[in-house]
Structure formats: C-alpha cells, structure tokens
C-alpha cells in the first residue's frame, strides 16, 4: 500500500498576511471607541473637557463636565472616563476585567494631577466611569453606533458604568 502524501499546510495562493490581522490597529480602534463614547456623552448634554489627557502618571481617555443627580440634588460634576473597546468573544468581559485595581490607582493618581493642573475644576465633585464599547458584525438596533472605515463592522456602546470605582 502506497503512503499518502503529507497534508499541505501552506496558505492558499490568494492569502495575504493582512487576512489574519485585526481590521484596525488597536490604538486606532480604541480612539474610535472613545469618539463614540464622546458623541454619546455630548448627546447627554455633557461637555468634553479633554480627550486622551496625558501626564507622567498615565492617560485618561475622556474628562467630562456634566450633571449628576435630579431635582434639588442636581449638581455639576467632573467624570474621568476609561473607555474599553473590544471585539465579540473577548476574554476580559468586554474590557471590564482590564480595569484592575492597579489601573484604577493609576487613573486616580492621574486625575489628581489633572486637578492640580486645572484648579478651576478642582472644586467639582468627581467620579470615575467606565465605558465598554464592542465591535460587532452588524449594526445594533436602538443603540448609538459607528461604522468602522472600509468594512462592515460597527462599534456600539454596550455598557456605561457611572461611579465604577
């Protein structure tokens, strides 16, 4: 009995390495997720104070001035927003598990430094929010979404956690 030839594991002739890579670099995808969340916050009558604010301690994705509470308890506040953009089937609960205790401490330190640099905002109550954005194959119904350039994928805001930590 003749031995069969070994299986051919070479890629098909029309294969290109970009076929297996993500649609966009992670940094660009993250920036689009931040853009989507900023758009949503603006629709909620918030003002974007800073985007991607950097210091030697770290980066804050969005710093937002808005309102908290209702009626007589309504007050102006400042939110430091961490945005996590993920594809479906990710390992870290849509990015929530990536906001570790260490990451939270880094965000707190960075926020304190921001307030030192912007004393006119330091009297406002502050909170830390987390926005979870998902990349999906189809446009979600009844949700704010953003189509990715040059493809049929959409970003949508899955969860917005106020006072997350």
Image (cartoon, rainbow, N blue to C red):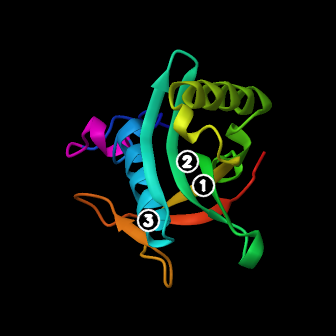
* Image location (x, y in percent) of residue 84: 57, 47
Q: Work out whether 96 lies above or below 150.
A: above
> Mark 1 highlights which residue?
131
Look at the image and tell me whether residue 104 can be seen.
Answer: yes
Q: Work out whether 115 lies above or below 76.
A: above
Q: Work out whether 116 lies above or below 7.
A: above
In the image, residue 2 lies in the stretch drawn in magenta = no
Residue 83 is labelled as 2
> Mark 3 highlights which residue?
42
Where does the magenta region start and end? 13-21
How many angstroms separate mark 3 from mark 1 (CA)?
14 Å
Residue 159, picture quadrant: bottom right
Of circles 2 and 3, the one toward us is 3
How many angstroms separate mark 2 from mark 3 (CA)?
15 Å
Query: Which residue does the image show at 60% across and 65% down from the upper left?
Result: 158
Query: Which residue does the image show at 52% across and 15% down from the upper left?
Result: 56
* Image location (x, y in percent) of residue 73: 77, 70
* Secondary structure of the residue carrying numbered label 3: helix
Q: Are marks 1 and 2 in contact (CB under 8 Å)?
A: yes
Looking at the image, is mark 2 or mark 3 earlier in the sequence?
A: 3
How many angstroms separate mark 1 from mark 2 (CA)?
5 Å
């Amino acid at each position: 009995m003749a031995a069969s030839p070994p299986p051919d594991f070479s890629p098909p002739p029309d294969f290109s390495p970009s076929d297996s890579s993500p649609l966009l670099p992670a940094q660009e995808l993250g920036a689009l997720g931040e853009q989507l969340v900023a758009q949503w916050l603006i629709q909620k009558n918030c003002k974007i104070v800073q985007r991607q604010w950097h210091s030697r301690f770290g980066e804050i994705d969005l710093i937002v001035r808005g309102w908290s509470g209702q009626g007589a308890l309504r007050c102006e506040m400042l939110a430091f927003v961490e945005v996590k953009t993920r594809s479906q089937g990710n390992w870290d609960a849509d990015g929530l598990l990536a906001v570790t205790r260490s990451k939270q401490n880094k965000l707190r330190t960075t926020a304190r430094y921001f307030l030192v640099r912007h004393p006119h905002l330091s009297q406002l109550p502050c909170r830390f929010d987390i926005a979870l954005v998902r990349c999906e194959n189809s446009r979600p119904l009844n949700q704010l979404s953003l189509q990715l350039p040059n493809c049929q994928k959409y970003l949508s805001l899955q969860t917005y956690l106020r006072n997350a930590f």
